[in-house]
Image (cartoon, rainbow, N blue to C red):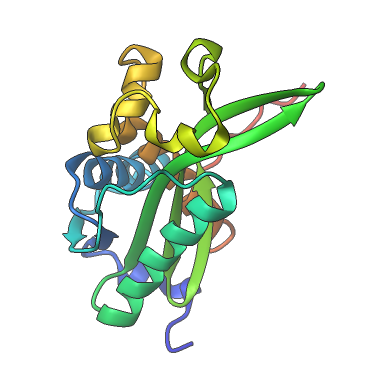
Amino acid sequence: MTRDLTNFWQRFQSGIEVAVGGSLPEKRLGVRDGFVRYFHEGLKASVPISVTPQPQDESLTPLPVTDEDILSLAQSRARDLELLHGDRYGFYVGNEAGLLLFEAGNQSRYLVRSWTVVRVVGEEAWGSSGSVQLPESVIRGLDAGDLPLTVPGTRRSGGMFSSLTGGLETWRSTTALATVNAISTLMYGRLDSRPMRKHPRR
């Protein structure tokens, strides 16, 4: 490893540059929201943050149907960017959303979730958003293979999150949450002034 995460703050005093795989606006803006929340709101650091979209194949294929599939795709996006650009950017980010099956109490439930993978100096961390369940009325009578093609909304602009929550959540907001969660894990213990809340003494 040619750079040391312990020197992170000194290296990035002048600004933080992020490359994100794909050009969809909701993805890019969500990643930026996550970085702003962590560094500006969490660390109280007013450093400039630049998020640059990088062209990658985003053809509308069926949604991934397991967490492993979603993470694998997000991970490959982030790693491909790092291999392509080396140390040109401080962070490399991949983000994807998809379906997952959760079985409990002899009942199957399908959920939609967003995952973000963040890489820096050869290390990476993962973070996810909250999950939104597909209503039974949407999936009733469908085979598992039909689900990726029948999720409400579209993959573009986070339409499935917006559709399922009546606009309360979007791909942008779920991407932001997944991103700040990934950054928090990646940077935990690396900075003296990492964001954390002090609990009052009882």
Q: Is residue 108 above or below residue 198?
A: above
Instruction: Please state which of residues 126 and 102 is positioned toward the viewer in this rendering.
Output: 102
Is residue 131 left or right of 121 when viewed as pictured? right
Is residue 8 visible to the viewer in this orientation of the structure? yes
**x, y percentage for residue 115?**
47, 46
Which sits in the foreground, 122 or 128? 128
Q: Is residue 13 above or below residue 182?
A: below
Residue 136 at x, y percent in the picture = 55, 13
Count the marks: how many?
0
x, y (%) of residue 200? 67, 25
Most foreground residue, 34 or 157: 157
Picture quadrant where residue 42 is located? top left
Q: Residue at x 57, y 46 (%)?
A: 66
User: Do we see residue 191 in this rendering?
Assistant: no
- Outermost bottom residue: 2
Q: Quadrant of the C terminus?
A: top right
Q: Residue 33's image quarter?
A: top left
- Rendering coords of residue 29 (x, y %): 22, 42
Residue 188 lies, with reference to residue 40, above or below; the image says: below
Compared with 95, 21 (above or below) is below
Q: In this view, does 109 lie to the left or right of 121?
A: right
Left or right of 104 on screen, residue 76: left
